[in-house]
Amino acid sequence: MHLAPRIAHIAGTDGDGWGIYYRTREMIRAGERVLNLTIGEHDVKTDAAILTAMHGAAMAGHTGYTFGAGLPELRAAIAGRVQARTGVATRAENIVVTPGGQSALFSAHMALLDRGDTGLYCAPFYPTYPGTIRATGAEAVAVATRSSHDFQPEAAAILAAASGARTLLINSPNNPTGVIYGRGTLEGIAGAVREADLWLISDEVYDTQVWESAHLSPRALPGMAERTVVIGSMSKSHAMTGSRLGWVVAPEAVVEAITLLSTVTTYGVPAFIQHAALHALAQGEGFEATIADPFRRRREIAARALAGSQAIRAIPSAGAMYVMLDIRATGLSGNAFAERLLEEERIAVMPGESFGAPAAGHCRVAMTIPDEDFAEAMARLAGFADRLLP
Ligand code: PMP
């Protein structure tokens, strides 16, 4: 059977890294107690009031086709939110609603990349990134960041990779590292992007999970609004992963191109979900803080549990629901560490290698289990690592 090379190209040659995740699921299904720190998803469900709004909208008849870029009132609400949070003038015409942030990432790259082009992304990376770029027919090229620089992208590395590139994808607060790109980093990125004449695609789906300083959108830097495309989502900010509600913020021509793409792919997001999103956004920042709070608490728990460890250096988690552990002092790879941790302690973490070469010798901890279990997992993980020291 012939498959189009373009679709075969999506998989690429990166290792998949999901072995631990699938094995953990099997063990849990078989009734074993495994402390599962692999999943980037809240341990709370979507709030009942949001579901009531969704049900109400469906019962009120919002069950038909929804062509186009999204409900005008939702696009306006998202534009208002973006403007309030970033200070950048943003109109409903700058917003297109998509089925989740992942669809927004795909749509943005489809609008800006073509076969034969190169799309850049920073490594360590969220695992869908290279495949998303390759799905357009373009080549995906990683720009390495360094653990010793707390995984902050460096302008020189971007420029060194920029020949033939049209886009650069960044993510702050970052999955998997939990770092936030500070003003200096973002100004360096913006300078490199302007010099190499790239589009900047800024994945800001964790922008409400910020534990240190403040979230800064690169779209707010001078001269950047016209070459920046921002990816947003309700998944993380409102615990609505399954509702599939995301958006793109972009110059109008990009929004129009993505709207055309949605007509031949998704036909838009169901109206009852868009109404639920409107309801959720109207709950304001207090609600968003409640959703983010467990991760803020657990980040402290992790810091306390790891403070005395000789074997682990935790990259300070400034945002998102993750903490990245440098375990190279144990002499093990991230893969070997994660395998043995699962085997010997029944604790599951993601090997750094599954997020790209710069995260080798690291593990990603998702802070997504209840506080008490999380505290137990971190204490046992620290003890396990220290026992591996020579
Ligand atoms: N970007 C990043 C960095 C993510 O971690 C995720 C989800 N884990 C997404 C995008 C996609 O999220 P969604 O499609 O649910 O909005």
Image (spheres, rainbow, N blue to C red):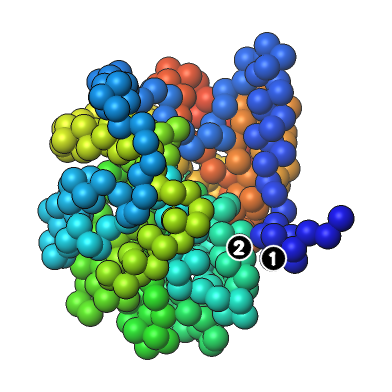
Q: Is residue 168 left or right of residue 35?
A: left
Cβ–Cβ below 8 Å for labels 2 and 1?
A: yes
Residue 104: name its quadrant.
Answer: bottom left
* Residue at image coords 54%, 87%: 163
Q: Which mark is residue 135?
A: 2
Q: Observer-nearest residue: 203 or 293?
A: 203
Q: Observer-nearest residue: 313 or 31?
A: 31
* Residue at image coords 68%, 17%: 29
Q: Looking at the picture, does residue 276 appear above or below residue 136?
A: above
Tell me where residue 4 appears, x and y as whole percent. 74, 63
* Residue at image coords 38%, 23%: 44
Q: Observer-nearest residue: 156 or 26?
A: 26
Q: Quadrant of the N terminus?
A: bottom right
- The residue carrying mark 1 is 6
Q: In this figure, what is the number of numbered marks?
A: 2
Q: Is residue 181 left or right of residue 244?
A: left
* Residue at image coords 72%, 39%: 19
Q: Looking at the picture, does residue 323 appear above or below residue 140?
A: above
Amino acid identity at mark 2: Ala
